[in-house]
Image: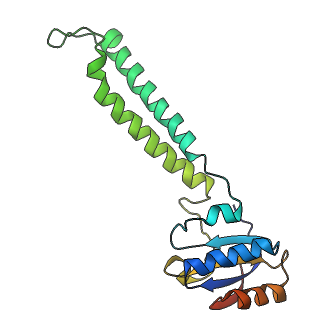
Amino acid sequence: MRELGKEIIFGLYDDEQDLLSAVSSATHDHMDIYDVYSPFPVHGLDPILGLEESRLHIAGFIYGALGTLTAFLGMTWIFTKDWPIIFGGKPYWSVPAFIPITFELTVLFAAVGMTVTFYIINGQGPGVQNPILHDRISDDKFCIAFDTHSVEEGSAKSFFEKTGATLVEKKNI
């Protein structure tokens, strides 16, 4: 989660290729990028920024396995101990009959668990107010932001001019 009360200088770009070349240039010049904003995922941006692959799929597997165990163990207990009734000549513990419910609970636990984990990790959720640098970032603009404590304002402005930013602004968040 980002700290509040920071002074940010950012530049907006019209095209994702301009953004990629600007991020490449900033990492080549050893400039400390605060964050990069985009209205959609940009292919090839993560390796340039040095970001690791998300481990959300591991959490999804764990949540799915928990759903499978919950369904399978719950039905086993219900149909063998709590309410043992023979349905159409099937045995009490009929594994093929458990498959549809087991599948549904696996998908449900994985989906809900990954959604909650995603929101918690990214600091999003009910009542959270995230700062907005510029209204067009979520529409059709791409943005690179620098913290003014780690990058001088003059060098950031010259960087944005050199890389073709269409708008450069400074904002407290």
Please state which of residues 121 and 61 is positioned toward the viewer in this rendering: 61
Can residue 5 be seen in this snapshot? no
In the visual, does 82 lie left or right of 124?
left
**Can you say which quadrant of the picture contains the N terminus?**
bottom right
Position of 154 relative to 113 (above/below): below
Percent coordinates x, y for residue 138 in the rendering? 52, 76
Indicate the quadrant where residue 78 lies.
Answer: top left
Percent coordinates x, y for residue 87 in the rendering? 18, 13
Position of 87 relative to 126 (above/below): above
Q: How many marks?
A: 0
Percent coordinates x, y for residue 82 in the rendering? 33, 12
User: Which residue is painted at 50% across and 70% down in the image?
Assistant: 40
User: Which residue is painted at 83% across and 86% down in the image?
Assistant: 155
Position of 93 relative to 124 (above/below): above
In the visual, does 101 lie left or right of 67?
left
In the visual, does 74 lie left or right of 116?
left
Please state which of residues 106 and 155 is positioned toward the viewer in this rendering: 155
Position of 93 relative to 146 (above/below): above
